[in-house]
């Protein structure tokens, strides 16, 4: 493992928050490394980012067990998506946007799909538009397109042809709905978090905003 906070010479950057990215197929080594990392930070509030909150909780409990510590109180556990939302919070607030969650995403997608279907704008998707799983499948598709950096307003003719008029229309309607209601989906939150990290010490700000 290597610290992610380094200067141009490869050493720790002055005043930088200490971070470590650990990649290992050996569970025992992951737990040992995390336990050692905790032991070095007894005066700080550590943050552990994992694919899910349950995985983070289990990872931390096993690591703390190696230090004979009984609980996880004082250790921030989060997921990558939750961390991105926290880092993007100030930017979203300044822009007047609110995070768009899973259930709300389904509602937005269902709304635009029904409107498009009523106008006969679904094209090849029309035969499956009334099926129960269509809004969820469409939501997953729009999310993947957005997270790939595709925007309806920036699609070139080749990309538009590849997507088809139906998906291009739905992507545009989805983005229009987000703007109208002041909502930020995961792609928006990841972009805002990335911008915040590039402009300043957003991680330190995130930690300062947590109860000590």
Image: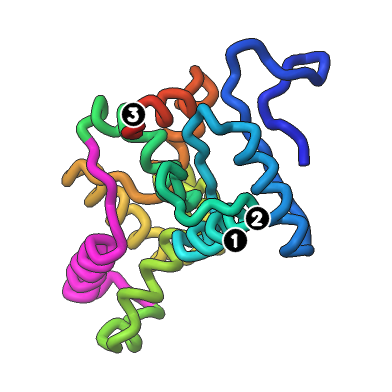
111 or 58: which is nearer to us? 58
Residue at 53%, 48% in the rendered image: 49
Question: Considering the numbered disc 2 on the image, is that residue within a helix, a strand or a loop?
Answer: loop
Give the answer, above or below, for where 151 lies relative to 43.
Answer: below
Q: CA distance from mark 2 to mark 3?
A: 29 Å
Give the answer, above or below, for where 169 lies relative to 87.
Answer: below
User: What residue would you read off at disc 1?
Assistant: 62
Question: Which residues, given as a range, are shown in magenta?
Answer: 97-123
Label 3 or label 1, whichever comes before in sequence order: 1
Task: Give the class, few, some or many, for how many residues have Cα within 10 Å of label 1's Cα (few <14, many ≥20).
Answer: many
Question: Considering the numbered disc 3 on the image, is that residue within a helix, a strand or a loop?
Answer: loop
Task: Give the class, few, some or many, for how many residues have Cα within 10 Å of label 2's Cα (few <14, many ≥20).
Answer: some
User: What residue would you read off at disc 2?
Assistant: 66
Question: Considering the numbered disc 1 on the image, is that residue within a helix, a strand or a loop?
Answer: helix
For the C terminus, the image quarter is: top left
Q: Is residue 160 visible?
A: no
Image coordinates for residue 127, horizontal then vertical, percent: 34, 88
Find residue 209 and name its label: 3
Q: CA distance from mark 3 to mark 1?
A: 27 Å
Q: Quadrant of residue 62?
A: bottom right
Task: Give the class, few, some or many, for how many residues have Cα within 10 Å of label 3's Cα (few <14, many ≥20).
Answer: few
Q: Is residue 110 magenta?
A: yes
Residue at 41%, 30% in the rendered image: 206
Q: Main secondary structure of the magenta part?
A: helix
Image coordinates for residue 61, horizontal then vertical, percent: 53, 59
Label 2 or label 3, whichever comes before in sequence order: 2
Residue at 50%, 33% in the rendered image: 194
For the N terminus, the image quarter is: top right
Q: Nearer the viewer, mark 3 or mark 1?
A: 1
């Amino acid at each position: 493992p290597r610290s992610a906070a380094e200067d141009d010479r490869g050493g720790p950057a002055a005043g930088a928050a200490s971070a470590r990215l650990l990649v290992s197929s050996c569970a025992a080594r992951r737990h040992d490394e995390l336990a050692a990392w905790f032991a070095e930070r007894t005066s700080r509030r550590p943050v552990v980012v994992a694919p899910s909150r349950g995985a983070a909780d289990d990872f931390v409990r096993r690591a703390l067990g190696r230090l004979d510590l009984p609980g996880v109180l004082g250790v921030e556990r989060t997921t990558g998506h939750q961390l991105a939302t926290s880092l993007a919070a100030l930017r979203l607030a300044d822009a007047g946007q609110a995070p768009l969650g899973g259930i709300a995403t389904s509602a937005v997608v269902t709304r635009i799909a029904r409107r498009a279907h009523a106008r006969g704008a679904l094209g090849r998707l029309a035969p499956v538009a009334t099926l129960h799983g269509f809004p969820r499948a469409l939501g997953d598709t729009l999310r993947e397109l957005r997270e790939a950096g595709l925007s309806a307003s920036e699609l070139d003719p080749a990309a538009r042809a590849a997507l088809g008029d139906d998906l291009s229309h739905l992507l545009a309607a989805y983005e229009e709905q987000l703007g109208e209601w002041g909502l930020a989906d995961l792609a928006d939150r990841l972009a805002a978090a990335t911008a915040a990290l590039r402009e300043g010490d957003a991680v330190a700000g995130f930690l300062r905003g947590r109860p000590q």
